[in-house]
Image (spheres, rainbow, N blue to C red):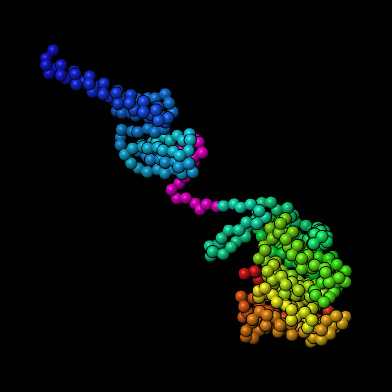
Amino acid sequence: MSKYQAVHELESATLHFARWWVVGIALTLGASCGGPAASTETSGASAESSGEAEASEASSGAGDESTGDGSGESTATSGAQSESSSGGGGLATSSDAATGSVETTGGDATSQASSLSDESEATSGGEASGEDSSGGSVQTCSPGSTLVPGETNRMVDVGGVMRSYILHVPDSYTGETPVPMVLDFHGLGGSGMQQRGSSGMAALSDSEGFVIAWPDGIDNAWNVGPCCTQSRDVDDLGFARAMVEQASEEGCVDRQRVYATGFSMGGGMSYHLACNAADIFAAIAPHGFDLAEETSPECAPSRPISVLSIRGTNDTVVPYGGGQGSGGRFTFLGAEGTLARWVELNACTGDPTVDGATALHTECAEGVEAGLHTLEGGGHASGPGSVTWGFLQRHALP
């Protein structure tokens, strides 16, 4: 053997030994770090480990990079090598150098596209709220609604006194979309059932999709200050709030669109709510009643509130022109005097817009309205329910 041949064979043996020494070191380091072994494919030889493969590297020089941070995000890029790291356990990646695709499986990691959709957040409770594109609050519904379409007789505790009312839920109610609510109060000596049959609001509830309640007054009356229950301690304001709260807890009521209406003394109760519960009620539409000299000075709504009075010119119980009512309990401001008072309370300016039987002030504080719908020749009776709902539905709490 020549000197040069000996040197050549020595160099070949050295290179062969060095190659396997490097592979051995790599396997030893992988095992000592607790990670899976690496598999490297070359054009002439291959090394294979018995452990789970986490990353493979092709000798062509093209590869993919996949990273998992525990939230399951996977990102594919082109590059010279394939590298994998994970903040969550059990993540395994396989790369295809020819296509550049990356598939991620195992553990709690998931594959995610580079263009991510907006996250959504669910909250617990009777109501959930989000934000619309204009930045305003949008009420949504939680899945726990127990209200179902139909009509039920219900009770609610108001300061230890059980109060009764009829609740009607329209056929269209699903519990998935917030719906408006209307409280419809009966006249003196009446009942919730009687008001249900005479106001015309029941059919509108079904056709327009709002929840409606017909309450029963103690002594068949309402406590609106100086009149008309036998006891001045009856808490009808609390009763109104409790009905809204109970329906809202059990179903999906749009709390920005809660309204009050009623006939005669029930109209007086609507005014009482506007004066004392404008934080709950967005608008009112009373029939056959006016503000009175005995109560008007004390009316101080917490905010401007939309009001439409529906009045008959031949009403002899609550005179259209004002003065003492037939029962002698109130001295009324009259239909036009009541409108003037609401124009003052709502800081309205300018002349009203007249459209048929309706005179409406629209230039009022916070965008509310104050109006009077006059029924020529009408007596002491409810006006059209369509006028009531047509006005109420336009208004919501700010």
Q: Is residue 86 above or below residue 168?
A: above
Q: Where residue 378 sits: x, y (%)?
A: 81, 81
> How many numbered discs sit on the rendered protein?
0
**Residue displayed at 38% across by 40% down:** 65
The C terminus sits in image quarter: bottom right
- Apparent side of residue 81 relative to residue 395 in the rendered image (left or right): left
Instruction: Give the residues drawn in magenta, as a range.
Output: 104-120
Q: Residue at x 69, y 75 (%)?
A: 301
Residue 64 rendering spot, x and y as whole percentages: 37, 39
Main secondary structure type of the part rendered in magenta: loop
* Residue 173 horizontal/vertical position (percent): 71, 57
Q: Is residue 15 visible?
A: yes
Residue 15 falls in which quadrant of the image?
top left
Q: Nearer the viewer, residue 102 or 171?
A: 102
Tell me the quarter of the image containing the N terminus.
Answer: top left
Residue drawn at point x = 42 percent, y = 23 percent: 50
